[in-house]
Amino acid sequence: MRFEIRGWASAALIAASAGLAANAAAAEITWTNPGSGAWFDGTNWATGAPPTAADTALVNNGGVATAGIGQDVTLQGFGFGSTVGAGAAAEGHGIIAGNLTAQGGPRAVGALSQGDGSSAAGTLTVGGTLTGLAAVGRAVNDGPSTTAPSTATGSVVVGGDLHLNAPLVVGQALYGSGTQASGAVSVADGTLRTQGMANLGWGIGIGSGATGIGTVTASSVDTSSRALDFLVLGQAGEGGTGHGTLAIGGGDLDVANFVSIGAVTGQHRGEAAGSLTLGGTLRAQPGVGAALQVGLVTDFTFEGAGSGTAGGTLVAHGIENFSSVTIAAAALHKGVTDTASGSATIGSGGIVNTIAPGGRMWVGATDAFVINNALAGPGASVTGSASVAGDIGGYEQVAIGRVGEAGRANGRIDLSGGVLATREIEVGVVHRRPFIAVPDGVAHATGRLSVTDGEIAIDAPGRIVVGGSFSSGAAIDETSSSGTLELTRAKLRGGSLAVGYGPAAQGSLTADDSTIDVDAMLAGTDRGAASIALRDSGLRVRQAPMVIAAGDGSTGIVTASGSSISIDGSLAIAPGSVFDASRGSLSLADGTLTVGSSVEIGSFNPDSRGELSLENSIATAGGNLYVGKNANSGTLFGEAALLVDASLLTIAGDLRMDPGAAPGLEILFGVAGTERGLGGYGAIDADAARLAGRLWVDFAGLDPYTLGSSFDFDLIFAAGGFDRDFDTVGFANLAGAYVIRSYGITDVDDGQVWRVTLAAAEVPVPATMSLLLAGLLVALTRRRR
């Protein structure tokens, strides 16, 4: 991962925006009246005549130069409160009722350069259109060795439009501890308009070893004639402070190269805050591939270099065609105390990249540079969020809460009413490369993706990981990842879905009135943990198997109510291995489950447990259903349970329970009525059956007044018969009016059934059966944990 701030401090920006170096062919005409006077009164000027279009007008003596209504002013350049040199002081003001036009010379208000203990203060009010402005509130000291602080303040108010034909700096301070610069530009009822010129960039609120605060507000913007080369809002370095604000009511803002909102760079850090509010769309132009960064700390840092804090906010109708979008990020070496935060609130225009799809969008991401296969320090902390009311598309990857090597990252995206289309989504994921030592490092990633009335579309063969850890054997002492995916009246389609993937990874998926249609699905993998909850939703897994608690030490819990689950391939619940226990369960109530091939429940690890629970549901399996599968013909087995409560389970193949796994295997039937299957009593239809372990029958839901004198409950039907019976049988919650007259395997015309027959209480019960029921009732109570 690489983050950059490109070009804001270039020589072109500093020189062109200083507004101090006069055009060689232009004469400097100085205002001499220390009070208020008329612009066109020659006695107020040092030459005895007002400046012309070929001159530069300088008002630096504290005076106020005024031009009345209908008196337009045209100049080569101007300076109101502008000075050059150490220990200099300047103040100047201009009030132009009409239009003010500056062709190309210095255009500065409250600006100083080569300062060392200098001061500059200026104001400019233009009632009509202002053409030409370069620097407002800008202090540039002589260099890093400057000892005396300088101050610069500038304010510009424009009643009409502001035409910008040069790079613009508002609130910039360079060098000198204690140096401060503040600038403000207001175009409350007009439009910011750009005009053709090379290197046309805006820097607002920049402090390098000093404090720079800048604010620009406008009713609208028009960059159709010339896109900005770059836009920087709030940037700090070398221990400085930079705060920048740009607020524009309407119109689209075009940028050719990059936009940076709240960034800290350099070895000695600083504090930066940037804010962009735009009623229209922030749009990148075709070319090199523009980058948008909101809240960023970057570069190398060393012991004693201080901390960096960056914050950025972006509000816009839409974001278009940036090759990369990063909201809250850090990329550095060490960075022990660096923090970055960023937020974006985007309207129906969404965040889309149609010019050159294939970039990335990261929200809450931190990375650490590696030197000699080692890192130092716990890494930076970042927090990013994006609320989007439109589409997100054109990016190869969308990462939400991502850590590379070391650091802490928290990211969130809330998408409403739009489509998120990409090849890969990571939500709360840690990446660590092999053979990198991080003795005092941490890697914590937290991510949340919430989609309401929208859609997630994954391009083949893409994937979505919710809570993941890709460690590759890296040595980081403290690692965790947590991801959450929330779907509300939404769709998720395409690719593979992994929830809780990898060591110390936790993933959570909730779907409410939503549909999920994916190629493959893993819930809890390789020591990860997954929690999935479906409500009134549909889940389809088309190609690879659906695996719950896959691999050593994994946990997967899937619950569904009022939902439909369709798996074209197989279903495995806690298959595990002999090394570490896995725990997995799938619980379905008031829904349907369809599995195209086999179903496997449980593993041969002694501490593992797999469970499939059906309540008032219909389920089918296209192949065999295994309750405890002996994968290595050994004697090590965990627990496996199948619960069928007021449901019908149809198995195209065989029902198989491995005798070597008993007594860790069990099937429980719940009885809620006299109808076989849905809404009545739990039942299984299979081609053949091999039984083992324990059978439990729970009559808690049965109304004792509906049976009459006796009734048969055909719990398991096997067309090919049974080749083995259960090892133990237990019953619970049978009403006192009835007793069990008989139970076990019974021949029928088209196969065999495992049947329980109830009779009225006056029917004698064999003493041996009474004793068995009493003992098993206690065991049943203990088992239902």
Image: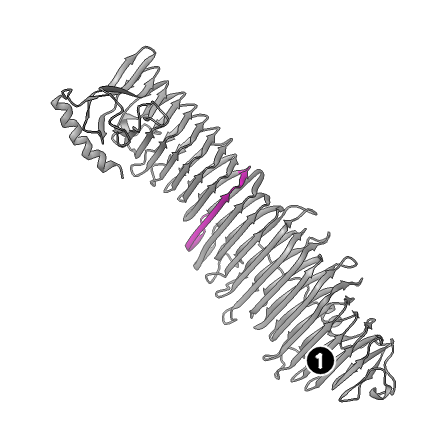
Residue lying farthest to the left in this orientation: 767
Residue lying farthest to the front in this orientation: 705
Vertical order, 154 against 522 (above or below): below
The answer to whether residue 500 is visible is yes
Q: Residues within 10 Å of mark 1 (few under 14, many from 20)?
A: many
Residue position for label 1: 122
Where is residue 279? Give x, y as percent.
Answer: 66, 58
The quadrant in which residue 136 appears is bottom right
Vertical order, 85 against 401 (above or below): below
The answer to whether residue 300 is visible is no
Which quarter of the figure is the N terminus placed in?
bottom right
Q: Is residue 448 left or right of residue 527?
A: right
Callout count:
1
- Identity of the residue drawn at 48% across and 66% down: 337
Vertical order, 295 against 661 (above or below): below
- Identity of the residue drawn at 77% across and 57% down: 224
Question: Is 395 in front, or is 68?
Answer: 68
Where is residue 549? Give x, y as percent.
Answer: 39, 39
Question: Is 363 in front, or is 156?
Answer: 156
Which quarter of the figure is the C terminus placed in?
top left
Q: What secondary structure predominates along the stretch shown in magenta? A: strand
Queried whether the magenta region covers residue 482, the answer comes back as yes
Range shown magenta? 472-495
Q: Amino acid at mark 1?
A: Gly
Where is residue 454? Give x, y as percent.
Answer: 56, 43
Question: Is 647 in front, or is 139?
Answer: 647
Queried whether the magenta region covers residue 131, the answer comes back as no
Q: Is residue 635 left or right of residue 502?
A: left
Where is residue 147? Give x, y as percent.
Answer: 61, 83
Secondary structure under the numbered disc 1 in the rendered image: strand
The quadrant in which residue 635 appears is top left
